[in-house]
Structure formats: C-alpha cells, structure tokens
Amino acid sequence: MAEQLLQNNQVVVEGEIVSEFEYSHEVFGEGFYYVKLKVSRLSESNDIIPLLISERIIDVDQSYLGQYMEVRGQFRSFNQHVGHKNHLILSLFVREYVLLDHLDNLEPNMIFLDGYICKEPIYRVTPFGREIADILLAVNRAYSKSDYIPCICWGRNARYARTLPVGSRVRLWGRIQSREYQKKLNDLDVIKMIAYEVSVSKMEYFQETVEYPAQYVAD
C-alpha cells in the first residue's frame, strides 16, 4: 500500500536554485526547509517552484544559489488556517535530488497524479475563445491523509473535465506551474500573490467513484 501511495503522486523537475533555505517546521526532531527552484518553460518564461526538503538529505547551512538540480518527489498541500479562512499551501516534497553541471532536459517539469475530483469542476471560456476547466484533485497519502491539488485543463480536456462528477477517479499528466495574481486586502491595499497548480496535458478517467465531499475552499 505504501508503494502504491508513492506512485500516485510523482514529480520530476530540473532547474536552478534561486533562494537560500528558509526554515519551515520540525517533525520528531527532523527539520524541514523551503528553497525555490526556477524551472524553464518552452515559452522561455519560468516557473518558480517551492521545494520542501529535509535537513537529513541536504546541508541546509550551505548555499546552493545558482546551482542546477534535478529533484524527484511529490506535490503536496498544507491547509493553513488564517483567521476564519483557509489558505492552501503547495510545495514539492523532495525525496531525492541530484546536482547537475548544466540543464539539458527537454521536459524539465513532469508530474503524474492519480486521485479523486473533490469539488465541482469550474468550466469557462476566455474572451479569446479558449476553454478552461479548474478541478481540485484529492490524492491519497499515507496515514489517512490527502493532498488537495488544484489542476487546470485546456481545450478538449476542459470539455471532458466539466462532465465529471465529484468523486470521479482520474489520472493526470502535466507540469507544475506558478502564476502571479493580485489580492485585494481592502479598498486601498493590494498585494501580489503566487498560486501553484498543475497544468494538465493528458487525463484518463477510471470507472470508479467515491463519496468525496470537498473539505474546504481555499481563498
């Protein structure tokens, strides 16, 4: 079972370290730290992906700024409570890494997820006629936990996703992407935020449905 849970959430990314380590939390004496990885897109833009990594597998007192790295792990979520609201924190949990001399991977950002749709898909069409569907995928983890991963589908995948009921089991292939947006705090103050999601390139549906109500709606 543990091996299956490792296989239902797989990520491989390759990029450049662009930050120092920042302390996150400790579990049974093991410290975990955030560090940011810049991953290139084919469009020549970049995604900045937060890595969550244990001090037991990397020296967090050393600077890796500017170094290239291949990372393998899982895309995980944490539900942070802020006041009366919930905020979904996403990061790539690192299981192993390799330092690289240079970047030459033509597909430096790959993710596979096997999970359940836990919120009604949101379908829309942009002013330019592009079809988009947002889904929230619950991916099981060990110890009866789940990761809630926002995913965005395009075109034919979007049209298909809009027909799937809550509880549908799907497999997704794609990439992790980051995007900036503005959040209005009040009538005067606006701050820049970064959202993370999976951009879906391929999707498969399984003939399996479970009772899986949405746990929350992150703002």
Image (tube, rainbow, N blue to C red):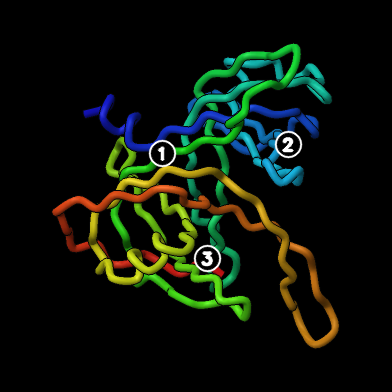
Q: In x, y percent, where is residue 36?
A: 72, 36
Which of the numbered marks, if any, corresponds to residue 86? 3
**Residue 52 % position (x, y):** 60, 34
Q: Secondary structure at mark 1?
A: strand
The relative height of residue 84 versus residue 41 in the rendered view (above or below) is below
Q: CA distance from mark 2 to mark 1?
A: 20 Å
Q: Give coordinates of residue 193: x percent, y percent.
A: 72, 61
> Which callout, 1 or 3, points to the residue nearer the camera?
1
Which residue in the protein does label 1 denote? 112
- What is the spatial separation of the Cα atoms under label 2 and label 3, in whole angstroms? 27 Å
Taking the view exactly as shown, the residue that stands out farthest to the bottom is 187
At x 62%, y 22%, the residue is: 70
Please give the residue where the numbered disc 2 appears in the rendered image: 38
The residue sitting at 50% across, 50% down in the picture is 78
Residue at 46% of width from left, 60% of height from top? 153
10 Å neighbourhood of mark 2: few (<14), some, or many (≥20)?
A: many
Q: Residues within 10 Å of mark 1 (few under 14, many from 20)?
A: many
